[in-house]
C-alpha cells in the first residue's frame, strides 16, 4: 500500500494545480474570454458556419430532417441513438476521454480531466503522451457536440454520461464503481453515522454532511494514507482485487475480518444483501488518480514487417488475379445448364455449396466468397422462373469478351464497396437460422469502410512492404474500439486481408501497383495488363492422354478443349486429360472424329499421340451405333445380335424393353433415361430425331433475365456534400433567427407569447399587421401551422396580401413563399434593432 499512498499524493498534486505555475497569457485569456455557454444549444449557436457544417458532416444523422433551428439541432444531438452512433466513431483515446468525463465531477475542470488520464508525472518524469494528446481528443469531442463548455467547466452531454457512467447492471469501461454519495443513497442514517465514527470522523447532524465528510476523507491523500496504514495485510489484498474492476464483490452473511474491517470504515459499501462495492473515490486514490489502467493516447504504428521487391509483389498479385478470373469463369459456367436452386428463403443450400466447392476444388468458405463476388459483379442471379435457379446473367457474356485486365477490374470494383460479407456464411443469425451463401442477412454496412481503411494502411507503407497483421488489427481497434461482445470490425479486417490476397489486390501481403490504383479510384487495368501472360493458341499433347496448356488459352480453343477433355490440374500450366466420356461428350456436342483429329493437329505443338487417335476413333466407331428415339422411346440397331445381347442383360430390366422388329426395340423409359441406362451398361448410343438424323446434344446455355448488381447497404445516412451542408446551415441559422428574434412588447394582451411559444393574435389583428408590414416593407414575426399540422416560427417580409394569402420573403427559408392567412396563429412586430 506504500505505492498507493505515493500515487495518491501525486493525484492530489495533479488535480489541484498550483495557480502560481499558470502562464500569465492563459490567465489573461480566461479573464477576457466571453461568458461560458449555459447549454449545448448556446455552445452550438456560438459556432461559426464552418464549425456547424463540420458537425453536420461528422454526424449526418442530425440532418434527417434538417433541424428548424439550433435548439432542435442540440436536442437531436443529445438523443440516445445519435449519441451512440457518435461514440461508436471515436478513436480509443477520445473514447477514454469521454469515459473519464463520465466518472469525473460535472462540470469538470481541465486539470482534473488531465489528471484522470495522465496522472502526475512530476515525480517520475514519465509521460504516456496523454497530456499532449488530450487537447486533440477534447477537440474531437467538442466538434462532435459530445462535450460543451470551456476548460473551466467541461460538460459531457447527459445522454453520453448515462451511457458511459458505471451502474450495477452496466459496469463502466474504466472499471470504477459509484461514488460514496451514490453508494450510500439507500443506506439508513444510523448506519452512515456508524461508518463515520469507525473511520475516526466526528459525528454530524444529518446524513448529507456525513456523506460529505466521508467523501472528504477518501479524497484526502494524507488521511487516506494514515487510514490504510492501520488496515490488515489481507485487507490490502481485497482492495487490490477490486481496484481496477470490476468493483463489485460477493460477501457471506458473516464476512472475514479483513472484509469486515473495510466495510465498517466505508472502504467497501454494501451494494446488495450479498454484494459490496469499492467506492469511486477509494479506487481513484489506490490508482493514483487514473481513470484507466492503460491509457492509449497514441495510435499504434503499423511498420513494415517484410520487404519485397515491388516487381515481385506485382507479379505475385497478377498470378492471383489470373487465378481469380479462371475461378469465377468456371463457377459461372458450371451454373449455365442446371444451376443450383434458390432456397425458399433465398440463397444456396449447404449441399449445393459443397457441390460448388468440389467443382472449384476449394473449401466451402472460399466457394462462398467466389459466389458472392460473382453475384456482386452482376454475373449471376436468380432466373425468376417458377422453380427458380441461379444462372448466369446476360452481363456474363459481355464480361467474357473483355480483356483479362478489364475483367479483373470489374470484379475488384464490385468487391471494394460491397456490403455483403461471405465470411458470415455458415454462422447463425440472432434467430438461430444459418446464414447461407447468396442469401439474405449477409449485408454488413461497416464492410466497405473497413475494407478501405485496411487498404489505406497498406498504401501508407513503402512499395513492396507488408505489415504484421496483428499490428494492423491493433491500429484498426484503436481507431474504432469494439463496443460490446461483438468484434465484427476485426473479423471484417481479417477477411479483407484474405480476400485481397486471393483476388490479387495484394501480393505477399503488400499492396500491388494496380491495387493502389483501384484504391485511389484510377483504372487499374493499364497497370495489370502488362503483368498478365498473353493467351496462347496451342497445347502440348502427351502420350499419357493428357494435354498441357502452357498459359491461358484463347477463348475458342479453351471452350472446345473444355468439352473434349477434363481439367486434371490448374495453375500456371493447366493439364487436361482425355477420357472416353469426354470424347463422347464432344461427339454428343456435334463434333465428328474427323473434326477432332483436325482440331488437335492444328492446335498441338507436338504430334498427336497414337493412343489419343485410337481413343477418338474407338469412341467414334461405337458412337451412334445404337439409336434412341421417342416411342415412349425406341432402340434400333442394324446388328440384331447386339439387340439380343441388350435384351439378355439383367441390367436392362428397368428400361422396359421389348422387340418390335429384328432391328428395333421399344422401351417404356423416356429417351434420356434410356440413353443414360445404356451408357451405364457400357454402350455408346446416340439420340436421333424423328427423321432419323443424329441429334446434337449441345445444351443451350441458360441465362437469367438482365439484373443489376446488388446495391450496397449504407451505414446510416449518406455523408452530405458541400451544397447540402451549406443549405442546411443557412436553414438552421434562419430558423434560429426567427426563434430568437426580439419582438416588440404587445399593445394588447392577445399578442403576447411566452418564450418558445407561437404568437396568438385575432384574425383581424393578423390581417392588419401584415398589411401594414407590406405597405412599409418591414419584417414581422409569425407563427404558422402547415397542412400536416407542424407548427413553426418564421420571420417574413410581406409583399402582397390578397385572396386570403400573404406572399413575402421568408427569412427562415431564404426564399419567397406564400402563406395562408387562416394558418397564421399570430403575428408580432420585431423590435427596432431587429428590423
Image: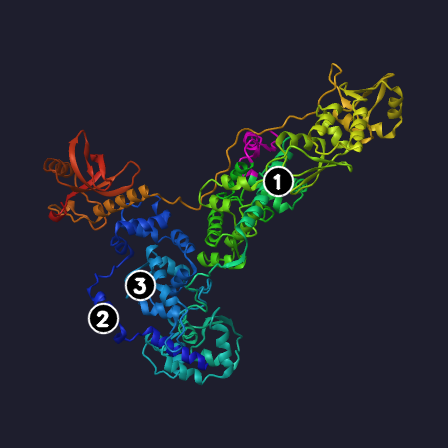
Q: CA distance from mark 2 to mark 3?
A: 22 Å
- Nearer to us of marks 2 and 1 is 1
Toward which corner of the image does residue 777 lie, by quadrant?
top left
**Which residue is disc 2 drawn over?**
24
Q: Nearer the viewer, residue 35 or 129?
A: 129
Secondary structure under the numbered disc 2 in the rendered image: helix
**Which residue is disc 3 drawn over?**
154
Q: CA distance from mark 2 to mark 1?
A: 71 Å
User: In the rendered image, which quarter contains the C terminus?
Assistant: top left
Q: Nearer the viewer, residue 205 or 78?
A: 78
Residue 401 spot, x, y in % from top left: 56, 31
Residue 645 spot, x, y in % from top left: 89, 25
Q: N-terminal of the two: label 1 or label 3?
A: 3
Magenta segment: 374-403
Toward which corner of the image does residue 342 lie, by quadrant?
top right
**Which residue is disc 1 drawn over?**
327
**Left or right of 270 on screen, residue 667:** right
For residue 312, above or below residue 406: below
Q: CA distance from mark 1 to mark 3?
A: 58 Å
For residue 227, above or below residue 733: below
Q: Nearer the viewer, residue 589 or 201?
A: 589
- The residue lying at 65 percent from left, 45 percent from top is 362
For this orientation, the residue located farthest to the bottom is 230
Q: N-terminal of the two: label 2 or label 1?
A: 2
Residue 430 visible in image: no
Secondary structure under the numbered disc 1 in the rendered image: helix
- Nearer to us of marks 1 and 3 is 1
Q: Nearer the viewer, residue 798 or 568?
A: 568
Amino acid at each position: 500500500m506504500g505505492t498507493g499512498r505515493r500515487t495518491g499524493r501525486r493525484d492530489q498534486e495533479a488535480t489541484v494545480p498550483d495557480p502560481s505555475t499558470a502562464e500569465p497569457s492563459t490567465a489573461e485569456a480566461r479573464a477576457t474570454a466571453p461568458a461560458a455557454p449555459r447549454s449545448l444549444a448556446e455552445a452550438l449557436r456560438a459556432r461559426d458556419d464552418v464549425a456547424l457544417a463540420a458537425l453536420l458532416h461528422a454526424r449526418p444523422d442530425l440532418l434527417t430532417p434538417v433541424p428548424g433551428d439550433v435548439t432542435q439541432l442540440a436536442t437531436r444531438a443529445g438523443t440516445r441513438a445519435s449519441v451512440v452512433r457518435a461514440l461508436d466513431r471515436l478513436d480509443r483515446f477520445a473514447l477514454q476521454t469521454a469515459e473519464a468525463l463520465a466518472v469525473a465531477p460535472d462540470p469538470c475542470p481541465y486539470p482534473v480531466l488531465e489528471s484522470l488520464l495522465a496522472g502526475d508525472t512530476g515525480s517520475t518524469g514519465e509521460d504516456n503522451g496523454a497530456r499532449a494528446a488530450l487537447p486533440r481528443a477534447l477537440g474531437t469531442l467538442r466538434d462532435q457536440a459530445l462535450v460543451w463548455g470551456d476548460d473551466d467547466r467541461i460538460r459531457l452531454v447527459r445522454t453520453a454520461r448515462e451511457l458511459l457512467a458505471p451502474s450495477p447492471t452496466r459496469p463502466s469501461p474504466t472499471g470504477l464503481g459509484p461514488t460514496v454519495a451514490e453508494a450510500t443513497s439507500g443506506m439508513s442514517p444510523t448506519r452512515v453515522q456508524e461508518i463515520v465514527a469507525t473511520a475516526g470522523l466526528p459525528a454530524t447532524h444529518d446524513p448529507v454532511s456525513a456523506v460529505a465528510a466521508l467523501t472528504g476523507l477518501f479524497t484526502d491523500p494524507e488521511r487516506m494514507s494514515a487510514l490504510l496504514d492501520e488496515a490488515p495485510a489481507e485487507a490490502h489484498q481485497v482492495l487490490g482485487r477490486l481496484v481496477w474492476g470490476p468493483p463489485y464483490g460477493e460477501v457471506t452473511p458473516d464476512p472475514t475480518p479483513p472484509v469486515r474491517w473495510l466495510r465498517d470504515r466505508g472502504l467497501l459499501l454494501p451494494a446488495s444483501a450479498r454484494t459490496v462495492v469499492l467506492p469511486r473515490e477509494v479506487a481513484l486514490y489506490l490508482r493514483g488518480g487514473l481513470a484507466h489502467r492503460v491509457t492509449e493516447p497514441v495510435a499504434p504504428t503499423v511498420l513494415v514487417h517484410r520487404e519485397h521487391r515491388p516487381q515481385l509483389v506485382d507479379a505475385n498479385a497478377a498470378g492471383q488475379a489470373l487465378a481469380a478470373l479462371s475461378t469465377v469463369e468456371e463457377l459461372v459456367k458450371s451454373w449455365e445448364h442446371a444451376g443450383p436452386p434458390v432456397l425458399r428463403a433465398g440463397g444456396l443450400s449447404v449441399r449445393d455449396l459443397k457441390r460448388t466447392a468440389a467443382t472449384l476444388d476449394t473449401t466451402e468458405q472460399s466457394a462462398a466468397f467466389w459466389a458472392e463476388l460473382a453475384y456482386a459483379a452482376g454475373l449471376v442471379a436468380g432466373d425468376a422462373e417458377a422453380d427458380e435457379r441461379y444462372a448466369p446473367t446476360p452481363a456474363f457474356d459481355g464480361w467474357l469478351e473483355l480483356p483479362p485486365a478489364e475483367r479483373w477490374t470489374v470484379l475488384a470494383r464490385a468487391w471494394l464497396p460491397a456490403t455483403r460479407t461471405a465470411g458470415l456464411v455458415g454462422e447463425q443469425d440472432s434467430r438461430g437460422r444459418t446464414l447461407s451463401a447468396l442469401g439474405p442477412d449477409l449485408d454488413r454496412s461497416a464492410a466497405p469502410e473497413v475494407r478501405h481503411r485496411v487498404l489505406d494502411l497498406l498504401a501508407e507503407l513503402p512499395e513492396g512492404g507488408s505489415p504484421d497483421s496483428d499490428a494492423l488489427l491493433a491500429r484498426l481497434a484503436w481507431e474504432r474500439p469494439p463496443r460490446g461482445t461483438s468484434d465484427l470490425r476485426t473479423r471484417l479486417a481479417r477477411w479483407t486481408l484474405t480476400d485481397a490476397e486471393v483476388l490479387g489486390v495484394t501480393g505477399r501481403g503488400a499492396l500491388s501497383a494496380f491495387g493502389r490504383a483501384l484504391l485511389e479510384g484510377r483504372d487499374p487495368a493499364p497497370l495489370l495488363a502488362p503483368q498478365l501472360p498473353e493467351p496462347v493458341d496451342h497445347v502440348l499433347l502427351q502420350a499419357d492422354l493428357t494435354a498441357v496448356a502452357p498459359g491461358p488459352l484463347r477463348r475458342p480453343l479453351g471452350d472446345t478443349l473444355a468439352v473434349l477433355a477434363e481439367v486434371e490440374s490448374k495453375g500456371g500450366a493447366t493439364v487436361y486429360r482425355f477420357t472416353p466420356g469426354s470424347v463422347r461428350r464432344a461427339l454428343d456436342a456435334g463434333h465428328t472424329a474427323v473434326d477432332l483429329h483436325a482440331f488437335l493437329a492444328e492446335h498441338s505443338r507436338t504430334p498427336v499421340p497414337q493412343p489419343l487417335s485410337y481413343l477418338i476413333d474407338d469412341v467414334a466407331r461405337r458412337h451412334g451405333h445404337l439409336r434412341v428415339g421417342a416411342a415412349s422411346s425406341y432402340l434400333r440397331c442394324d446388328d440384331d445380335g447386339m439387340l439380343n445381347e441388350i435384351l439378355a442383360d439383367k441390367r436392362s430390366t428397368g428400361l422396359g424393353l421389348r422387340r418390335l422388329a429384328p432391328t428395333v426395340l421399344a422401351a417404356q423409359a423416356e429417351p434420356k433415361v434410356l440413353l443414360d441406362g445404356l451408357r451405364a451398361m457400357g454402350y455408346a448410343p446416340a439420340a436421333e430425331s424423328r427423321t432419323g438424323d443424329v441429334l446434337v446434344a449441345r445444351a443451350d446455355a441458360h441465362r437469367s433475365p438482365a439484373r443489376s448488381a446488388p446495391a450496397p447497404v449504407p451505414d446510416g445516412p449518406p455523408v452530405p456534400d458541400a451544397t447540402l451542408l451549406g443549405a442546411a446551415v443557412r436553414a438552421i441559422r434562419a430558423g434560429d433567427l426567427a426563434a430568437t428574434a426580439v419582438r416588440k412588447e404587445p399593445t394588447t394582451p392577445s399578442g403576447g407569447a411566452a418564450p418558445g411559444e407561437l404568437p396568438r393574435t385575432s384574425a383581424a389583428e393578423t390581417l392588419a399587421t401584415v398589411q401594414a408590414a407590406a405597405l412599409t416593407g418591414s419584417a414581422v414575426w409569425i407563427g404558422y401551422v402547415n397542412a400536416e399540422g407542424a407548427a413553426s416560427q418564421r420571420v417574413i417580409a410581406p409583399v402582397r396580401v390578397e385572396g386570403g394569402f400573404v406572399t413575402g420573403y421568408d427569412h427562415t427559408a431564404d426564399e419567397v413563399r406564400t402563406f395562408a392567412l387562416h394558418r397564421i396563429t399570430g403575428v408580432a412586430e420585431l423590435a427596432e434593432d431587429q428590423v
